[in-house]
Image: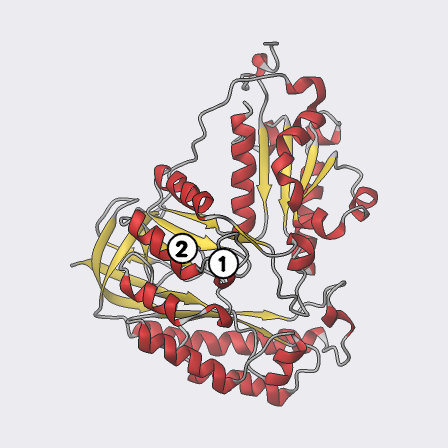
Amino acid sequence: MQDNGAASGRLMRGAVSFVTLGCAKNEVDTRDMKGRLRKAGFQVEAAPDSADAIVVNTCSFIQAATEESIEAVLDVAELDGVASGEVPLIVAGCMPARYGEELTHELSEVRAFVPCSREDDIVAVVEAALGERAGRGAPEEERTPQVPFAYVKIADGCDRFCSYCTIPFIRGRYRSFPYEEVRDEVAARAADGAREVVLIAQDTGRYGRDLAEPSTLAQLLERLAQEFPTLWFRVMYLQPEGITDELLDTVAAHANLCSYFDIPLQHIDPLILRAMNRSGSPEELMALLKRIEERVADVTLRTTLLCGFPGETEEQFEALCDFVEEAPFDYIGVFAYSREEGTAAYDLPEQLDEEVKAERAQRLRDLADAVCSARISRRIGRSMAVLVEGREEDGQLYGRAQCQAPEVDGVTYVDEGEPGGVVSVSIIDTLLYEMEGERS
């Protein structure tokens, strides 16, 4: 093998650095790209300023995410090695998938663009970008740092075509991953030290319908719960239509399936939902939430709401606020509508002013904080298992109970335990979304 980069102390094939923006699905894509490069002999945990190549995995779901991604690309482009042309800059993910050829004219600093559909080719792209400097190297053992939780994708793409959403154009049509692929990924994450696996997709409730041998999300969970009894499993991004009695009964039957339902309702007004290419009414959606509570004990409910959609009246917004006050949600994510080119909603009449959208979003967030924090305070006195994640700078241990999803629902502070372990605590206090527990 040729001596490529040995003088600098780097691995034979050089070092590839990743900058990842966006959601958990992008984090999984970055992990997969790193795995492919690692198997090909590249080092993949380098800092951008010491790398031989840099990959920026972008998000482009809404305009704000696109702007953040472009800013990140331009920041990397200013690094000395990139600016001189020695270090190739590669842009991957949603932004090249959404904007395609436009980017080649706008971002001349970028050596190659890799849309979501081509991320499996990342090794060839990096080799081509490095040219003769790519060299040859032996595969590095494919291991990732031990963490207490990990995301696993069970499907990609989306068939819903909600009128405000760019995902079907970025990720393509819905496609479920066969059980064997999901199972192998879960096993790999468990081997890396994960004690909780978060199952994600654009629409998890639709899992399995498109497989050669049709399946359901409930059947997937049943098999995983039995095969990995020491792992916690959590499902995110469940559309209302995907919540079947079979799914509810499966979650209720297994202690290692988190009694946690993340249901992005977006709105509750029938006219607004129809304009979003969705369905439902306050009565139907409230009945769904009550059905979940009746069938699954100690259930936790999360939703995402979108305000300021074209044509939304003050009365419709107030009805959404009334629903939030009455609904049994523990956590609510609030977003203002973003007008995205290429979506059906872009050309709808009665587009609202940005100031109106921002003001409504803040009002709804304030209401959600008040309602949800009151519900969370009712957990005081309950005993809960907590997966310990780490320590704060002052040494304070923290983790999450099954009622808290990673990165979005706050944490639980505990007085005993070790990172990666599970401890039983009694909740003694809450502050907004955080909880405090003592070893019971």
Point out residue 391 in the picture as x, y percentages from the top left corner: 33, 47
Report whether 429 appears left or right of 90.
Answer: left
Disc 2 marks which residue?
220
Q: 325 or 291: which is nearer to us?
A: 291
Point out residue 257 in the picture as x, y percentages from the top left corner: 33, 59
Instruction: Name the quarter where the N terminus is drawn.
Output: top right
> Which residue lies most toward the front here?
213
Q: Is residue 396 visible?
A: no
Residue 109 versus residue 171 in the image, above or below: above
> Which residue lies most toward the left here?
440
Report whether 211 appears left or right of 411.
Answer: right
Q: Which mark is residue 207?
A: 1
N-terminal of the two: label 1 or label 2?
A: 1
Q: Are marks 1 and 2 in contact (CB under 8 Å)?
A: yes
Task: Name the amino acid, label 2.
Answer: Leu
Point out residue 53 in the picture as x, y percentages from the top left corner: 64, 29
Instruction: Tell me the crowding category of disc 2: few under 14, some 14 to 19, or many 20 or more residues within 10 angstroms, Cα based.
Output: some
Q: CA–CA distance between discs 1 and 2? A: 8 Å
Instruction: Name the quarter where the C terminus is drawn.
Output: bottom left
Task: Name the amino acid, label 1.
Answer: Tyr
Q: Is residue 7 visible?
A: yes
Q: Assign a secondary structure to mark 2.
A: helix
* Snapshot quadrant of residue 76: top right
Q: 137 or 392: which is nearer to us?
A: 137
* Snapshot quadrant of residue 374: bottom left
Point out residue 119 in the picture as x, y percentages from the top left corner: 63, 40
Q: Assign a secondary structure to mark 1.
A: loop
